[in-house]
Image (cartoon, rainbow, N blue to C red):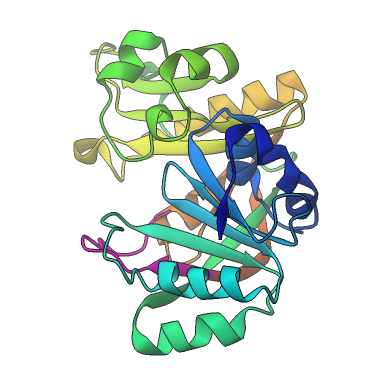
Amino acid sequence: MIQLKESEFSSVDSLLDEVPYNVLLAKAVVNGSARGAIWVDCVSKPQACYVRHQYGMAYLVGYTMDKGFRSALMLYLANHDGERVTPEYLQVYPGCWTDVLDPLVSDGALRLWDRSNFRFVPDVERDAASPASKNCVLRADRSSIETFRGAVIPGNFWKSLDCFLIHGVAYRHCLAKNPEITTALAFSAYRDEFNLELGIETAPKFRGQGYARLACITLIQHCLDAGLTPIWSCRTQNEASYRLAVSLGFREIARHPYYELSSAQNKGGTG
């Protein structure tokens, strides 16, 4: 596996364009809106690439019989050197890497989940379920983003907060009686001229009360007003995220394998 320089990242664009499901976070690494790394089998004309996003999402795309790439890939996936200490979650296209992946699943080095991709259905009813007098959704500013804590937050999806504030957008839900406290944050985990991938996090003490849905409704309306397509993907087994997507008007259109890579601090499946 040959690690590319940032100036060479665009060489894998054509490989990513062949994937029939959402790889927008890989695109974020390529275009520099997110931090990450890319490895290939050949610098001049890659046939396969491995893209790792700063959040821990990874993408194995294309196919090669190059022995050096395949050998290094197997060692990396198995965490042979023990250097991977945080979770990493891998999507693979095409599905002809089973000779590499299946033995690692059997050995416990990889854990197999499913990932669902959704299409947004604009005419689904999304009216707020809670009385408006008790709720408030505001455009999130620098201060409210910096003070909000969680795993799914802009800082884990964009290379810097400044970059996010220039190119991204976020809405926060708060209680009308206490607007300085953010209960849920809906934001663009990725955005380009056509698409906006939603990210959502709810503060632990406010979960299960519908606040994430209210924030997402506002962000979706922002997408529609701006002519952007809202994008949602999640681990199929993440029941809360799946149910929220459906309630917002998303419908599952594809499901594919999703591999959890072993690490020294595995915490179980995520988004």
In the depicted structure, whether residue 116 falls above or below residue 146: below
Whole-percent x, y for residue 192 in the image: 70, 28
Dividing the picture into quadrants, the one containing residue 169 is: top right
Q: Does residue 149 appear left or right of residue 48 in this picture?
A: left
Towards the viewer: 227 or 154:
154
Query: Where residue 148 sits: x, y (%)?
Result: 28, 24
Residue 114 seen:
yes
- Which of 227/158 is in front? 158
Q: Residue 260: within the magenta?
A: yes
Q: Is residue 139 visible?
A: no
User: Percent position (x, y) of residue 207?
Assistant: 28, 42
Residue 76: image quadrant is bottom left
Q: Nearer the viewer, residue 197 or 4?
A: 4
Looking at the image, which residue is at 80% across and 57% down? 18
The quarter of the image holding the N terminus is bottom right
Q: Which residues fall within the magenta stretch?
A: 258-271
- Residue at image position (43%, 83%) is 105
Q: Is residue 26 above or below residue 218?
A: below
Residue at horizontal 67 percent and vertical 73 percent from the top: 66
